[in-house]
Amino acid sequence: MPTDRIAADLEALLPVALAHLKAWVDTNSWTLNRGGVDKVARLTAAAFEPMGFSAESVPSTDPNHGDHLVLTRPGTGPTSVMFVSHLDTVFSPEEELRNNFRWQPEGDRIHGPGTHDIKGGTALAWLTLEGLRRHDPALFEAITWRFCLNSSEEVLSADFGDVCRDRVDAGTRAALVFEAEGKRDGMRRLVVSRKGRATWRIAVAGRGAHAGVKPTHGANALTQLGRVMDRIAGFSDPSLDLTFNVGLARGGSGLNRVPESAEAEGEFRAFTTDAYEFGKRRLLELEGPGDVTSPIDGYACRISGTLTSEMSPWPCNAGTDELFGVWAAAAEGIGQRIEPESRGGLSDGNQLWDSVPTLDGLGPSGDNDHCSERSADGTKLPEYADRSSFVPKARLNIEALRRLLGAGQAR
Ligand SMILES: [Zn+2]
């Protein structure tokens, strides 16, 4: 049966995919380790080169970050598909050393920096394409494959969205993001929407005064900031799935002084564009005179609010739903079960869904991403990917790609 033959072949290819993965994991590529990120890019390009991919480095707009990587294999027909992953991880070389966090297979789990987020996803993309090339060479040759890898996804680099969008054309059928899948009761979960996130800063300008001599001359910026932070905490609205977090606060300069300035920073997140815009309005409405004033002359603290970064939500939408439908039908065809998931964390899918139908969660299963610590009693475990998830997931991706692009479809 062809299904079994493809799965058996993928099983035979898995050691090669995992050898690539190990080389990428052995190379630290913390977002701020420019040299490491660029080295992972070179290793990745070398892994895809035998399949006919050529590599292009696209400098990041931030000089502290490595280059983005675009791998392209031109097809004979007008249709193209974009794969999306990233090169960086959240772990500094010092942290990896401190926690002895490195490539470490243990039973079915492969621990290591990036095994789950997202180098394991890049390995799964490799396995998917190599499997497709062997089993449906005509389809593989017909499609233009573009694989875009972000050098700095973990800090939400906004310029990578442009790198991808510049390479979307009329023939682009899908953007497939290889972040890890979710799982629930043995069910694979593919990501069909993600929260948007904005970060903000609130600054309060008060009026300083000697705390013992002229306290009433002061307008206490920290007291004002306290009130504002409390109001911001109240902006969270479960009915809208809108969450605000006050993450940092600072102010004042001495115990004998009425603080002249103070500021706080935080973020908010929402799944829908409406809730996101509502959150944005609530925050910006704080701008203006405060209610902490000097008793002497009514001098009021002044509040100003700014958004320091924005990544709008990836809401549920028809293009994504259609792609999910193809994957669901493919899953059923090969005896797997999948379901859609809306996820709180962001990915490059947030930047792409409104340019091209986008589906995410195409990587392996695993857990504990962004964690490097291990405790003796096993209550803390570092990031890992499940080895046994690679072959069935690649099998599913191949089946879905053949349905999306194959028989009866214009290529
Ligand atoms: Zn990631």
Image: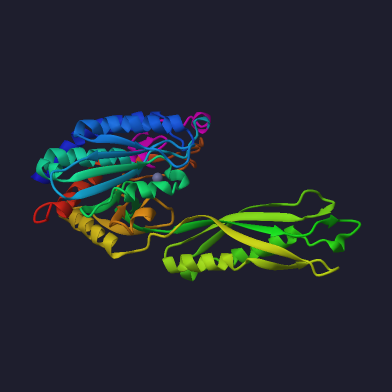
Relative image position of residue 354 (x, y in whole percent) = 33, 59
Relative image position of residue 161 (x, y in whole percent) = 38, 50
Q: Residue furthest right?
A: 213
Tell me the residue at 60%/54% (across/down): 265
Which is more toward the observer, 321 or 215?
215
Name the quarter where the N terminus is drawn. Answer: top left
Q: Is residue 76 left or right of residue 86?
A: left
Q: Is residue 180 visible?
A: no
- How many discs appear? 0
Q: Is 93 placed above or below 129 here?
A: above
Which quarter of the figure has residue 148? top left
Which quarter of the figure has residue 105? top left
Quadrant where ligand 1 appears: top left
Q: Is 294 placed above or below 13 here?
A: below
Tell me the residue at 85%/51% (across/down): 256
Tell me where the magenta segment starts and ends, as one range. 95-120
